[in-house]
Amino acid sequence: MRNHLTTVFLACLTLLFSACGSLVHYKVQQGDSLYSIGWRYGQDAKQLAAWNKLEAPYVIHEGQVLRIAPPLNQSNPALLQSARHKDQVHKRTPVTTSQRSNRKSEPQVQQKSLAENPGPVIWGWPTDGALLRTFSAKKIDRKGVDIGGQEGASVRAAARGKVVYSGNGLSYYGNLLIIKHNESYLSAYAHNDKLLVKEGDLVKQGQPVATMGRSGSDRVMLHFEIRFNGQPVDPLRYLPKK
């Protein structure tokens, strides 16, 4: 009886540690980029790079195991509170492309290409159509806004930037684009029919980047998100009022 209980106890411990491990590590799949992994787990790509000692341009390989949560020494409450405070300060004063000069996350050639016209990120609506659903910080399926429209309608870059993900590796987003606008802001365009740009492309605000579809969704629509340092924010705070 004692041996049986010991075996059960050890099995439970194994399952527990396995579950914990799955929460802090991720095995890279074909088509992944550091940005798509960060998007999946709500982490900033620069932070993922730091935790995994990756240098720009953040090349990752299929089968590689990456840490997707902070090491234990970065998880104490004081550090987290400090990070939240800095995040609130940044939300009150958005980071602009001209404020990136002292950061070393990417090679100078990439910084230069993104900063050809220094200034704040200027946002525009990514497509025409009725607003179907708004952002909610409390609901996991409402980290952006849903915009209706006809299949094949044009999906446009909401701001100038660089395409850092183009694919369908996050099934619940369908055909997905992620555009990097500066060191803090990313935007995403989900459920597309066709993707018109590829990773590495530089795009201008208003440039067609996809066509509207229903991939990963039960209806035709565009799901649009903006993230600040990896965290979802309400797009309606940034988009012009209609």
Image (cartoon, rainbow, N blue to C red):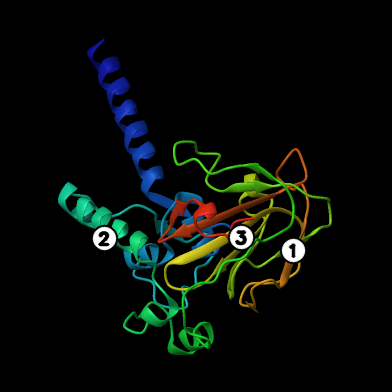
Taking the spot 60% from the left edge, 47% from the top edge, the residue there is 145
**Camera-side residue of 88 and 63:** 88
Q: In the figure, residue 74 lies in which quadrant?
A: bottom left
Q: From this view, report whether residue 73 is shown above or below residue 5.
A: below
Identify the residue at the far top of this view. 1
Q: From this view, report whether residue 222 is shown above or below residue 202.
A: above
* Mark 3: few/some/many CA within 10 Å (<14, 14-19, 20+): few
Give the labeled residue for mark 2.
86
Whichever of callouts 1 and 2 sits on the residue coming sooner in the sequence is 2
Compared across the picture, whether 26 is left or right of 217 comes to left
Give the labeled residue for mark 1.
210
Compared across the picture, whether 70 is left or right of 213 comes to left
**Camera-side residue of 217 and 135:** 135
Q: In the figure, residue 133 lies in which quadrant?
A: top right
Taking the spot 20% from the left edge, 56% from the top edge, the residue there is 82
> Separation of disc 3 and disc 2 at Cα?
35 Å
Amino acid type, mark 2: Lys
Taking the spot 54% from the left edge, 64% from the top edge, the residue there is 33
